Amino acid sequence: MPVFIAIAANTERNKNGQTITSVPVVYSHCIQRAGGVPVILPPTGDEQMVALMMSRVSGLILPGGLDMDAHFFNQEMHPACRASDPELDIFQITLVNLAVELQMPLLGICRGAQVANVALGGSLIQDIPSQMPESDIVHMQEVFSYGTDHDVRFEPDSRLYSLFGESIRINSRHHQSIDAPGKGIRITAWAPDGVVEGAEHESLPIDLVQWHPELLMQKSDGMLPLFNRFIHNCKERLNV
């Protein structure tokens, strides 16, 4: 039976000034490599429509994208934050809440990890360079690359440790990260400077990574175990 995987679309402006849905094609490629069928979910404020879309899929991926509006975690926007889209935030928070209610496997990547954490009541470091000035790691690399930038270490009894061992090298394309974890969220991965790089839910199949495994997959299969386990969890849910 095909396993349909939702990818939550982001929004952006095209050259004609129109708002369009946007998902880098590499996410779809990774889902297909792991044996799933990707389905793009367009943003909508209609909660009934969101519920209907989610009823047809077995898993959810929240991709990278814009900074979140800090009002969703009761803070004022930091001056270093880029333009946000509160309507998009509401749409993706609604998706997270539904995934939790349905006990649906969720993989949050970069912004997606941040959205999931905030949806569960957590908060974010809004700008690592100014809020963690002691860090000697450039987390937001200016030059786009498919290579790696720094190490990450994993909690020994975590799901990420079971996939990758004690430590691996990852890429880094973010200036925000998880601060206070949301309800049920356990921090399981850190950069050498202490910045959170990964987390998991204590009882639900929710996995969050701050780096971009979909980009690393363009160079090697090193991140395939992450997507394989996600698809495996989705298949198990189908058999319940």
Image (spheres, helix red, strand yellow):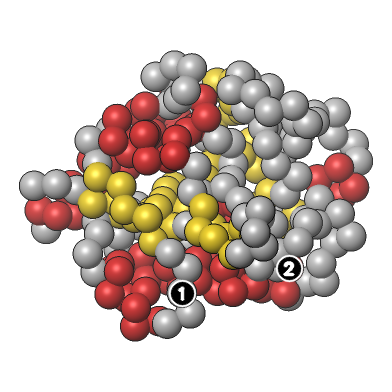
Tell me where residue 69 sits by quadrant.
bottom right
Q: Where is residue 182 in the image (x, y as percent from the top left)?
A: 56, 63
Which residue in the structure is indicated by mark 1? 44
Where 68 sits versus 2, above or below? below
Asked whether 144 or 211 is in front, the reply is 144
Q: Specify few, some or many for label 1: CA neighbours under 10 Å numbering under 14, 14-19, or 20 or more.
A: some
What kind of residue is marked 2? Ala
Q: Are marks 1 and 2 in contact (CB under 8 Å)?
A: no
| Amino acid type indicated by mark 1 | Thr
Asked if residue 123 can be seen in this view, the reply is: no
Query: Relative to 125, is 18 on the left or the right?
Result: left
Q: Is mark 1 on a helix, strand or loop?
A: loop
- Which residue corresponds to the image point at 50% horizontal and 42% vertical from the top-left? 24
At horizontal 66% and vertical 53% (from top left) the residue drawn is 15
Q: Mark 2 points at which residue?
A: 70
The reply, left or right, for residue 240 in relation to residue 212 is: left
Count of numbered circles in the view: 2
**Residue at screen point 57% across, 47% down:** 64
What is the secondary structure assignment of the residue under circle 2? helix
Residue 185 point in image, percent of width and height: 51, 56
Front of the two marks 1 and 2: 1
